Image: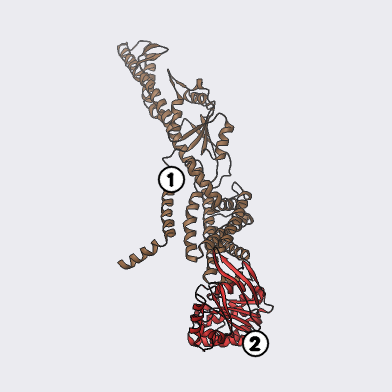
Amino acid sequence: MRWLLLKDLQILRRSPLLVALLLAYGGLVGALLGFAVQRDDTKPKVAFLNEVPSMDFGVQVGAQKIDTSKYANKLFESVDPIRVKTRAQAIQKVRNGDAIAALIIPSDLTKRLQAMVNLAGTGPPPTVEVLYNDENPLKTQAVESRLKARLADANKAISSKLTEISAGYLEILLHGGSFSLLGQQFSILGLQKTNDVIRQTLRELPHSSPQRADLEKVANFAQLAIDNLDLSKPVLASIGEPLHVKRTVVTGKHVSANAFYIALAAAVTLMIIGLFLGGGMLALEREEHAFGRLVRGPVSRWELLGEKVLLGALAALVATVVELAVISLFDDLRWARIAAWVLALLVGGLAFGAVGTAFGALTRDVRATTLLAILVALPFAFLALIPSGIVANWVYDIVRIASAIFPFKPALQAVNAGLNDADPGLAGPLAHLVALAVGYTAIARVGLRRFA
Amino acid sequence: MNVRGVTKRFGDRVALRDVSFSAADGELVALIGPNGAGKTTLLSICGGLLKADAGEVSRPPREVGWVPQQQAVYSKLSVAENLRLFARLEKVPDADAAVDRMLEQTGLRDRARDELGTLSGGNRQRVNIAIGLLADPPVLLLDEPSAALDPRQRARLWEFIEGLSGRGTTVVFATHDVAEAERHAHRVLVLADGELLFDGPTAELRGPDHADFEIAFVRFLRSKGH
């Protein structure tokens, strides 16, 4: 066993490219996983527009004024705010992917908070607005979980402060004490002591006194108030959500998580089958030594590549249609849109088939082609699922490049559009896929120079 | 077939230098030479697989049957399926008739439905050659046709090739086995380091002392500085 191990290490040492690839792969996957794990600690960029006039940032509760701007800072504890001056700028930041979302504090927020504190009727609740792109459910989930957490923090802080102040007044009202208003100190007797004074007075009054009936009414009222105001503290504490959220989608049609995951499963199948068959069957021509015999006359190199790309695409299409048909037994599938999603699958399959043929031409070996396909496809698919705005700019630049040069993201967008009528629609991703199919076929053609 | 002034370079290395020869109808020509002499490169250019940097070959690829050293057949297809596939790709007018003819010539009719992967090396080589003959080309190029065959398979193969030559097909074959070249070829071409050093009958190479052909071949190469 020792000698076998040494022999294998010797062989590996003589394949520096393979070793480098495997090590680089480990590093790459590690880095990707690191970014994924780090996501909760990194501060996503959120565009922030505060429309409340700076003078107007306080809510009067009794004699005290709460500075709501202090609590608004809760919203920024784990986000990186990009301050903007207009709503249009906020929308642009979200649309461009510079920010994961935009948070807009409307100009009437303080007034609405004040009205709520004053229990002034049933006006609209204080509401902040969140703008985001509904690119895919992963991003929507990421946006909502982060903003919900931050809003919950802000709500809790405001609610606690309101409860604390109101409870203080209730305490004075019940048990007496002193408070200051406009610089003057006031002493309050309190309901409890008032009740005690009245009861004492009643005990000392003769039974026939004409004031007794009225004083008993006041004493009963005081007792009723004492009994019920004791219950007011938990009632105040139940104002747990002073701030409400209005969600506004800047671009993108909403797609349910289930529908998106079906599109994702279809794109993965399309990728695996297209890559493996396109590349494997081209490399097989060389392994069977038939390549030279084919291209010396009967078949041109372009025809051979075209056939392999088409084979990969058709096999991927058939496999994915079967997969979707099985899924449709368990979940709704929009059969009415079959033309759109079959077109998306076909063009996606062509792009993956082309990438496969490029791998096949460059590696010239079925096993190496398969290995390369696995090594490359999985990280690219992973990268394509990272939503904009939740990673550092330079990481998202890498994601953008990866999505531009590998067909997974446009294929996912096309399949999602085909299946779910999702944004950005079919035309853009299909054009992207066609361009990639042509580009990778050209790379495969160059690779064939070393093929015979 | 006429080959005139063929030169081929791979980067700085000159694989063939101004090689010219002719082969008449029905002639069996052996191409011999040490390893790396350029035999496969010359046959590949004659067969249209490689392009020469200079020079020309009189026959276009469609008129030349090319049989590579390694068996270029699909091991998962049957004998008949392999033949039919290449007949269709070569646009042979009556593909089924061509397949039938090749099954007859190769003596593989009873194995027609067997997958290539299950056949012996000799039988696979017969299919390999049969594919080169599907279009009934006037010229057949064979690269090391008997390599890895046992003596009995080799004898049957040469019987088959000589039959082709007897029916008027020009056959040019490359081989390491000089004894085989002497036994079957009408004429030999000696290639070394990309240069054609000899073109003539084996008797001429053997010299006036009628030396053993292998000894005469090595002596000739040494005399030319190889």
Q: Which mark is residue A269?
A: none
Helix, strand or loop for disc 2: loop
Give the alpha-carbon distance from disc 1 to disc 2, as whole Å: 73 Å
Residue at figure coordinates x 58%, y 43% from the top left:
A252
* Chain that appears red: B
Q: Residues within 10 Å of mark 1 (few under 14, many from 20)?
A: some
Chain A's colour is brown
- A346 or A351, which lies in front? A351
Residue B34: x, y in percent?
50, 76
Q: Position of residue B62 (x, y in %)?
A: 66, 74
Question: Where does residue A381 sit, x and y in percent of width and height?
Answer: 50, 52
Q: Which marked residue is nearer to the observer: mark 1 or mark 2?
A: 2
Q: Along the horizontal axis of the image, is B93 left or right of B205? A: right
- Which residue carries the number 2 mark? B167
Write the residue at 37% across / 19% down.
Answer: A173
Q: Nearer the viewer, residue B153 or B141?
A: B141
At 57% across and 31% down in the image, what residue appears?
Answer: A87
Name which residue type carries label 2: Arg
Q: Which residue is mark 1?
A: A35
Chain under label 1? A
Specify how the rendered protein is coloured. Answer: by chain
Position above or below: A448 against A250: below
Protein chain holding label 2: B
User: B122 or A67, which is in the foreground?
Assistant: B122
* CB within 8 Å, label 1 to label 2: no
Q: Quadrant of residue A322?
A: bottom right
Residue A318 visible in the picture: yes
